[in-house]
């Protein structure tokens, strides 16, 4: 049984490493687009540099990834970087700085959520989830948000429906205790309401971000 457990651990590690690499690549591309498109003042430049530093650290953490559990450090680093980029965007647009919240429920690559939205999946009860501005607008318009789809077995499923190796991506929490508690509460509601079937019936979107 020991060798089977080790083989499974290696499969799970390869899986989360691929997800982490994809997240880092997507974030790096987003940073490049933003940096190329804007002239940044001192404060926005500071936030942007913080985001760049988080991106570089996340890449190093992915390269050193030895266990599935260690993926949480990558997620926390990318989440902090996405928040810093959201702050830089707000400064460029002359808007208030965003609240430090959990990432967008539908796809953490979208960055921190800005509002809680009432959402009814096609195969479950209505609940409230955190969403980014763009996904909140899509839901208000009656559209499906582009959710994070991952391979689970032989099919593509929303990230929150996959198994234990994807738990850090389903949580996607900031390091603050308040945000952590909010996401733990959300996970508890998911499990209590048959959370394994959340999102069935969603259309698969090829879009990666807002």
Image: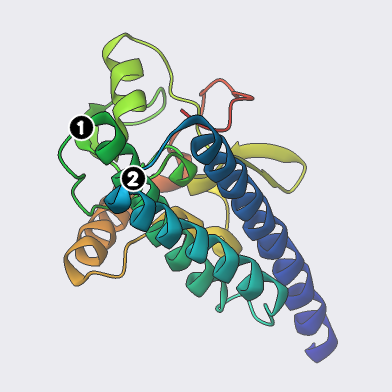
Q: Which residue is mark 1?
A: 94
Task: Give the x, y percent position of residue 150.
Answer: 64, 43
Q: Quadrant of the N terminus?
A: bottom right
Q: Earlier in the sequence, mark 2 or mark 1?
A: 2
Q: Which residue is mark 2?
A: 88
Does residue 194 appear in this view? no
> Which residue sits furthest bottom?
2
- Identify which residue is drawn at 31% across, 52% down: 42
Say few, some or many: other residues with alpha carbon within 10 Å of mark 1 (under 14 / 14 to 19 / 20 or more): few
- Up/down of 189 relative to 168, above or below: above
Task: Give the x, y percent position of residue 100.
Answer: 22, 54
Q: Quick one: SS at disc 1?
A: loop
Does residue 8 appear in this view? yes
Q: Quick one: SS at disc 2?
A: helix
- Identify which residue is drawn at 46% across, 66% down: 77
Mark-to-mark CA distance, 2 and 1: 10 Å
- Identify which residue is drawn at 45% across, 54% down: 170
């Amino acid at each position: 049984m020991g060798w089977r457990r080790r083989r499974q651990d290696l499969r799970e590690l390869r899986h989360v490493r691929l997800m982490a690499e994809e997240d880092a690549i997507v974030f790096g591309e987003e940073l490049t687009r933003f940096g190329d498109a804007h002239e940044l003042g001192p404060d926005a430049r500071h936030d942007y540099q913080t985001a760049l530093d988080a991106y570089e650290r996340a890449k190093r953490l992915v390269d050193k990834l030895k266990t599935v559990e260690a993926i949480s450090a990558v997620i926390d680093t990318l989440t902090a970087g996405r928040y810093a980029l959201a702050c830089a965007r707000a400064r460029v647009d002359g808007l208030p700085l965003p609240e430090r919240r959990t990432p967008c429920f539908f796809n953490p690559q979208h960055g921190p959520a800005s509002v809680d939205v009432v959402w009814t999946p096609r195969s479950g009860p209505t609940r409230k989830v955190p969403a980014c501005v763009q996904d909140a607008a899509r839901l208000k318009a009656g559209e499906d948000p582009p959710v994070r789809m991952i391979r689970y077995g032989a099919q593509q499923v929303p990230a929150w429906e996959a198994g234990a190796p994807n738990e850090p991506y389903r949580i996607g929490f900031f390091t603050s205790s308040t945000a952590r508690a909010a996401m733990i509460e959300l996970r508890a509601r998911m499990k209590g309401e048959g959370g394994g079937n959340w999102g069935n019936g969603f259309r698969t979107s090829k879009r990666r971000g807002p």
